[in-house]
Image (tube, helix red, strand yellow):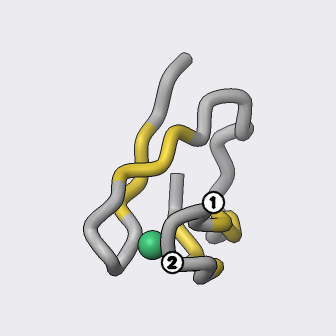
Amino acid sequence: MALNVKCKCGVEINVAGVTSSLEPVPVYCVVCGTVTEHEI
Ligand SMILES: [Zn+2]
């Protein structure tokens, strides 16, 4: 199951493989180096 989240810099990051959770999941952006949390 493919999921994409959008970094604050505008890049979409594929987070396929991350299990859906009620808690925010930290996602690392390889473009700007920022870790953002997303509810998946
Ligand atoms: Zn970014």
Residue at (72, 29) in percent of width and height = 17
Image side of residue 5 versus residue 10, left or right: right
Tag 2: residue type? Cys
In the displayed structure, would residue 7 be above or below residue 35? Answer: above
Q: Nearer the viewer, residue 4 or 9?
A: 9
Q: Which mark is residue 22?
A: 1
Identify which residue is drawn at 41% across, 53% down.
Answer: 5
Q: How far apart are labels 2 and 1 at the CA level?
A: 26 Å
Q: Element type at marker 2? A: loop
The quarter of the displayed image where residue 36 is located: bottom right
Residue at the spot 47% in from the left edge and 49% down from the top edge: 13
Residue type indicated by callout 1? Leu
Tell me which image quadrant ligand 1 sits in: bottom left
Assess whether mark 1 and mark 2 are in contact (beta carbons under 8 angstroms): no
Position above or below: 8 against 15: below
Sequence-first disc among 2 and 1: 1
Q: Position of residue 39 (x, y in %)?
A: 52, 63
Q: Quadrant of the N terminus?
A: top right
The image position of residue 21, as x and y in percent, is 67, 51
Q: Secondary structure at mark 1?
A: loop
Other-residue count near label 1 (Cα within 10 Å), few / some / many at <14 / 14–19 / ≥20? few
Give the vertical position of 35 relative to 29 (above or below): below
- Mark 2 lies within 8 Å of ligand 1 (Cβ measured): yes
Pointer 2: what residue? 32
Residue 11 position in % (x across, y down): 34, 59
